[in-house]
């Protein structure tokens, strides 16, 4: 859980540098992904050993992630830091239905209760803004749509994560995303390259925090937690976004927003408590089966 929370914090930090980027949204996304392919030689051997199905699944996830990045960057530029971090993390609306259909995951009561509480906190956070009209409606809509795409990317990564390393998932996803981002950049902005250090450094930091921090830690976490749990933990990103907005952009937090932050934290705590019991139950079941097998072996030996 802490690994994924680290990923959420990295995503929030990377969003700050998107605002500092001198390039259009699609160009920023393109160069971020292209720079990240510098690590591809380190996983080339692993990729060759993967099944075609896993490779295609991760590439398809990357294509979806490319659309997500374009919309996420657009949202950050055209609405507030807090609004974008809030709306771009509603991917629970995508991960829960997909996980129910594809993986037959059971949604238990503590998870549902925690999700409801967290959403109540989210409502308090967004409606408690000092200037509710701040931010673009189109930017808000695009940020929300990006969350649904990111939810689909989470599910794609989760489906193959136990058969490939986190770095391999990052690189395959980056390749797939370029299939989406490159033509979008050409159509919307034309080919734009960073030609000065002032244009390069925000992209490098976006790549560091967003790609290897956010996506990397997410890939590691999805090898240990379910995609649905990742989505509920992702609801904490507005908290990080609100704090960063306060520190860097002097976006004032009202008492209602502060209350919303605490409510979100409570909801996440309740939702993740459900994960401890099943693991203990699974471990107990394994131990029971092992003991039964050992007893059967002893009895068989005595019979002989």
Image (spheres, helix red, strand yellow):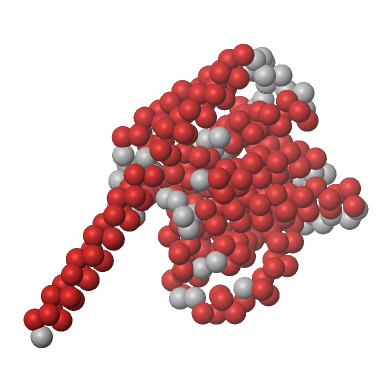
Judge whether residue 71 can be spotted in this image: no
* Number of dots carrying numbers: 0
Percent x, y of residue 88: 57, 38
Percent x, y of residue 181: 65, 56
Judge whether residue 291 can be spotted in this image: yes
In the image, 64: left or right of 255?
Answer: left
- Residue shown at 66%/52% (left/top)? 213
| Quadrant assignment, res 114 | top left
| Quadrant assignment, res 288 | bottom left
| Rendered position, 281 above or below 270 | below
In the image, 70: left or right of 276?
Answer: right
Residue closest to the eye, 283 or 235: 283
- Residue shown at 48%/28% (left/top)? 266
Residue closest to the eye, 160 or 27: 160
In the image, 75: left or right of 94?
Answer: right
Percent x, y of residue 218: 56, 52
Residue closest to the eye, 20 or 78: 20
In this view, which residue lies farthest toward the right? 196
| Rendered position, 218 above or below 237 | below
- Residue shown at 47%/42% (left/top)? 231
In this view, which residue lies farthest toward the front? 302
- Residue shown at 39%/44% (left/top)? 275
Percent x, y of residue 237: 59, 36
Look at the image and tell me in which quarter the C terminus lies. Answer: bottom left
In this view, which residue lies farthest toward the left? 303
């Amino acid at each position: 859980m802490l690994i994924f929370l680290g990923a959420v914090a990295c995503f929030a930090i990377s969003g700050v540098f998107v605002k500092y980027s001198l390039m259009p949204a699609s160009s920023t996304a393109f160069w971020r992904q292209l720079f990240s392919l510098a690590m591809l030689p380190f996983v080339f051997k692993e990729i060759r050993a993967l099944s075609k199905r896993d490779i295609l699944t991760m590439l398809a996830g990357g294509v979806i992630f490319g659309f997500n990045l374009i919309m996420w960057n657009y949202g950050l530029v055209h609405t507030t830091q807090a609004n974008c971090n809030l709306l771009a993390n509603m991917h629970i609306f995508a991960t829960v239905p997909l996980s129910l259909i594809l993986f037959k995951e059971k949604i238990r009561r503590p998870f549902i209760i925690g999700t409801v509480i967290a959403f109540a906190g989210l409502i308090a956070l967004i409606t408690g803004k000092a200037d509710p009209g701040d931010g673009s409606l189109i930017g808000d809509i695009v940020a929300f749509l990006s969350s649904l795409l990111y939810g689909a990317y989470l599910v794609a990564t989760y489906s193959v994560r136990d058969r490939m390393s986190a770095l391999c998932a990052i690189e395959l996803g980056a390749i797939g995303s370029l299939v989406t981002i490159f033509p979008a950049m050409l159509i919307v902005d034309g080919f734009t390259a960073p030609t000065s250090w002032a244009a390069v450094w925000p992209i490098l930091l976006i790549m560091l925090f967003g790609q290897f921090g956010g996506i990397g830690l997410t890939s590691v976490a999805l090898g240990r937690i379910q995609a649905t749990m990742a989505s509920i933990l992702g609801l904490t990103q507005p908290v990080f976004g609100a704090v960063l907005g306060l520190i860097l952009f002097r976006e004032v937090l009202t008492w209602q927003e502060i209350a919303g932050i605490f409510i979100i934290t409570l909801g996440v705590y309740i939702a993740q408590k459900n994960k401890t019991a099943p693991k203990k139950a699974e471990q107990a079941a394994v131990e029971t089966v092992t003991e039964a097998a050992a007893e059967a072996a002893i009895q068989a030996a005595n019979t002989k």
